[in-house]
Image (tube, helix red, strand yellow):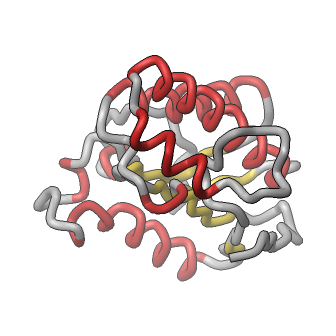
């Protein structure tokens, strides 16, 4: 699959994003790996105008809704930083099987790195109305339920569903509803 990038045309709207691990490899099975994602989102929130409205992290992908200026740049920063940090963790752990997969998925023309951690491409979906936002919000929060991991969305630790129920979650989010 070649590289494809959909453009963010109107930064006045929130956008739905999906980031998937190359080959759908299960990387987010340990707290330390997920914490890298959470810390990166927190850094973006504290140092830019990036606003996180919803998220869910599963073992091999994540979905989130975000807004702010230079959204494409922020997502690129997020993916670049987290890829480097997570590869470092995998190397320290001696996770040779996963690293072999990521070396396999790297395109030959990409000479700046040994691995392809995230699948290439970005397909942000503009959420230009309340219906679209609520539809994607429900999709995000119900993802762990649909996979059979939990019975209720707010039971999934790595999700903003708790925030939308008025409870504390692991990340600060900007509620939209």
Identify the residue at horizontal 74%, vertical 59% (top origin): 107
Identify the residue at horizontal 18%, vertical 48% (top origin): 155
Identify the residue at horizontal 40%, vertical 47% (top origin): 160
User: In this orientation, does residue 78 appear?
Assistant: no
For residue 111, above or below residue 126: above
Left or right relative to 2: residue 174: left
For residue 145, above or below residue 116: below
For residue 132, above or below residue 161: below
- The image shows residue 127 at horizontal and vertical percentages of 66, 73
- The image shows residue 24 at horizontal and vertical percentages of 44, 61
Q: Which of 88/62 is in front?
A: 88
For residue 105, above or below residue 147: above
Q: Which of 24/70 is in front?
A: 24
Left or right relative to 7: residue 40: left
Furthest toward the left, the residue is: 151
- The image shows residue 134 at horizontal and vertical percentages of 48, 73
User: In this orientation, does residue 59 appear?
Assistant: yes
Q: How many marks?
A: 0
Q: Which of 100/29 is in front?
A: 100
Left or right relative to 3: residue 87: left
- The image shows residue 48 at horizontal and vertical percentages of 79, 32
Q: Which of 1/31 is in front?
A: 1
Which corner quadrant holds the N terminus?
Answer: bottom right
Identify the residue at horizontal 80%, vertical 52% (top origin): 71
């Amino acid at each position: 699959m070649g590289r494809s990038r959909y453009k963010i045309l109107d930064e006045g709207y929130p956008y739905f994003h999906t980031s998937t691990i190359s080959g759908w490899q299960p990387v987010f099975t340990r707290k330390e790996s997920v914490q890298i994602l959470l810390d990166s989102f927190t850094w973006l929130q504290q140092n830019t105008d990036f606003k996180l409205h919803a998220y869910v992290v599963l073992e091999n992908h994540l979905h989130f809704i975000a807004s702010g200026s230079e959204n494409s740049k922020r997502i690129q920063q997020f993916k670049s930083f987290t890829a480097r940090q997570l590869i470092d963790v995998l190397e320290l752990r001696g996770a040779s099987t996963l690293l072999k997969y990521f070396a396999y998925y790297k395109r030959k023309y990409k000479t700046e790195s040994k691995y392809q951690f995230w699948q290439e491409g970005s397909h942000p979906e503009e959420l230009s109305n309340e219906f679209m936002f609520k539809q994607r919000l429900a999709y995000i929060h119900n993802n762990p339920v649909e996979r059979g991991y939990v019975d209720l969305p707010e039971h999934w630790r790595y999700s903003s569903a708790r925030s939308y129920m008025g409870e504390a979650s692991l990340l600060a989010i900007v509620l939209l509803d």
